[in-house]
Amino acid sequence: MPSISSNPVDVYASITGEKGGSSTVSVGFDTGSGYVNSIDMEAQSETANALITEYGTKVMRKHAEEMQKNEEDLFKDLRN
């Protein structure tokens, strides 16, 4: 991830199920000299947040597309 560090970056993630079926994703980026944080590594933190936001948007879009397809299939079945 050259946008965060010129060195290898270890990424750690944890997904926790929440009430109502939603999930919380926690992500840590270890640059080898410390974890990315908004105090010591402001630019890298903004980049990491942008990467996670972009990923989350892609996941939500894919989920919405799948739900729409399922509803369209159900509607087709009802019409037949």
Image: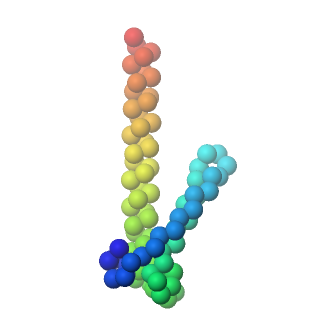
Res 20 quadrant in image: top right
- Residue 55, given in percent of the width and then of the height, sits at 41, 59
Quarter holding the N terminus is bottom left
- Residue 8, given in percent of the width and then of the height, sits at 39, 78
Residue 23 in the image: above or below residue 9: above
Residue 67 shown left or right of residue 16 in the figure? left
- Residue 27, given in percent of the width and then of the height, sits at 52, 68
Residue 23 shown left or right of residue 79 in the figure? right
- Residue 46, given in percent of the width and then of the height, sits at 42, 76
Q: Residue drawn 47% across and 87% down?
A: 33
Residue 46 seen from this side: no
Residue 53 in the image: above or below residue 9: above
Q: Residue drawn 44% across and 50% down?
A: 60
Residue 64 in the image: above or below residue 53: above
Res 5 quadrant in image: bottom left
**Residue in front for this viewpoint, 49 or 33:** 33
Q: Residue drawn 39% across and 67% down?
A: 51
Residue 69 seen from this side: yes
Residue 13 shown left or right of residue 55 in the figure? right
Quarter holding the C terminus is top left
- What colour scheme was applied to this rendering of the protein? rainbow
**Number of numbered callouts drawn:** 0
Residue 70 in the image: above or below residue 33: above
**Residue in front for this viewpoint, 10 or 25:** 10
Q: Residue furthest top?
A: 80
Q: Residue drawn 41% across and 80% down?
A: 44
